[in-house]
């Protein structure tokens, strides 16, 4: 799976979780860039990403991710 495939999958998850078809995430996207991305939605997002890609993030990974690019790198390393 390429990074392009990962970002395509992440865009689908983000659009579903935040109910916004206009969201386009990049490596630099953070919670500051998406209006409804709060701590509760962060949990929903992590669960949805794990389900989409068939993997689990460690608690350390979840708490240290600074942007979507870091999330994508973790996903790529697991598949």
Image (cartoon, rainbow, N blue to C red):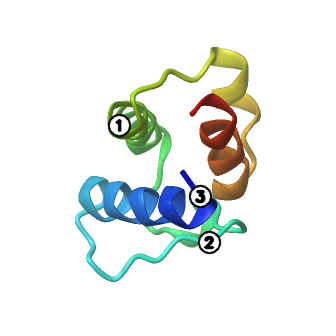
Q: Position of residue 39 (x, y in %)?
A: 49, 39
Against 75, is 63 above or below?
A: above
Circle 3 SS class: loop
- The residue sitting at 46% across, 55% down in the picture is 37
According to the picture, the residue beneath numbered tag 3 turns out to be: 2
| Mark 3 or mark 2, whichever is nearer to me | 3
Q: Looking at the image, can residue 36 be seen?
A: no
* Residue 66 appears left or right of 38: right
* Residue 18 appears left or right of 19: right
Q: Earlier in the sequence, mark 1 or mark 3?
A: 3
Other residues around mark 1 within 10 Å, as few (<14) / some (14–19) / many (≥20)? some
Figure label count: 3
Q: Position of residue 9 (x, y in %)?
A: 40, 57
Circle 2 SS class: loop
Rounded to the nearest angstrom, the CA distance separating label 1 from label 2 is: 19 Å
According to the picture, the residue beneath numbered tag 2 turns out to be: 26
According to the picture, the residue beneath numbered tag 1 turns out to be: 44
Rounded to the nearest angstrom, the CA distance separating label 3 from label 2 is: 14 Å
Q: Position of residue 74 (x, y in %)?
A: 68, 37
Viewer-nearest residue: 39 or 66 = 66
* Residue 19 appears left or right of 6: left
Other residues around mark 2 within 10 Å, as few (<14) / some (14–19) / many (≥20)? some
Can you say which quadrant of the picture contains the C terminus?
Answer: top right
């Amino acid at each position: 799976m390429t990074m392009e495939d990962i970002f395509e999958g992440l865009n689908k998850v983000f659009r579903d979780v935040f109910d916004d078809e206009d969201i386009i995430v990049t490596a630099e996207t953070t919670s500051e860039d998406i209006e409804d991305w709060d701590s509760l939605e962060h949990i929903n997002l992590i669960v949805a990403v794990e389900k989409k890609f068939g993997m689990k993030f460690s608690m350390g990974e979840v708490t240290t991710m600074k942007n979507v690019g870091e999330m994508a790198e973790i996903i790529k390393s697991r598949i």
